[in-house]
């Protein structure tokens, strides 16, 4: 099992910056990819950014060039630096981990979510 705890959400004006952090605990050695998804009211959950254990990153189209994801495998943390925030970035942000089991299967683990609100 892997537990994910997010921190760093809040209210910011358009053009501002926020930093989200996610701390993983439990069977962290089994985490392959880790990152962030967002969900706005009435919309499906969508990719923000994920990073592999080796550091390969993948960003959602709407955040490319504005957000940066980083990972510290020793501390089992992932950080999302969000710059030039827009009102459309307003959503609940969920930490996500792709966890591989010793049996060769994999499952997704999710944090509780943290609210990010960007005012215009």
Image: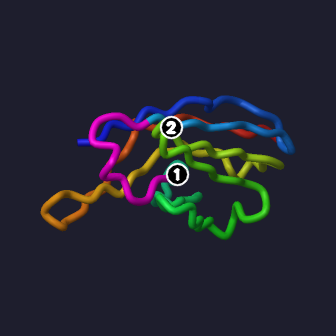
Left or right placement of residue 90 versus residue 30 in this view: right
Q: Main secondary structure of the magenta part?
A: strand
Please determine whether, in this image, residue 3 is positioned above or below residue 70. above
Q: Residues within 10 Å of mark 1 (few under 14, many from 20)?
A: many
Q: Residue at x 50, y 58 (%)?
A: 43
Q: Residue 16: percent from the left, percent from the top? A: 83, 39
Disc 2 secondary structure class: strand
Q: Residue 4: percent from the left, percent from the top? A: 39, 37
Q: Which residue is mark 1?
A: 36
Q: Residues within 10 Å of mark 2 (few under 14, many from 20)?
A: many
**Relative depth, front residue between 103 and 116:** 103
Please determine whether, in this image, residue 51 is positioned above or below residue 29. below
Q: Residue 99: percent from the left, percent from the top? A: 30, 55
Q: Which residue is mark 2?
A: 22
Q: Which residues are magenta?
A: 24-36
Q: Is residue 27 magenta?
A: yes
Is the C-beta separation of discs 2 and 1 under 8 Å?
yes
């Amino acid at each position: 099992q892997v537990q994910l705890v997010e921190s760093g959400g809040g209210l910011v004006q358009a053009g501002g910056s926020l930093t989200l952090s996610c701390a993983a605990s439990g069977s962290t050695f089994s985490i392959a990819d880790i990152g962030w998804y967002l969900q706005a009211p009435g919309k499906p959950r969508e990719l923000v950014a994920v990073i592999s254990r080796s550091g390969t990153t993948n960003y959602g189209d709407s955040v490319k060039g504005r957000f940066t994801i980083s990972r510290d495998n020793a501390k089992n943390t992932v950080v999302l630096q969000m710059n030039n925030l827009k009102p459309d970035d307003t959503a609940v942000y969920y930490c996500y981990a792709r966890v591989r089991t010793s049996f060769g299967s994999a499952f997704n683990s999710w944090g509780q979510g943290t609210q990010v609100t960007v005012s215009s």
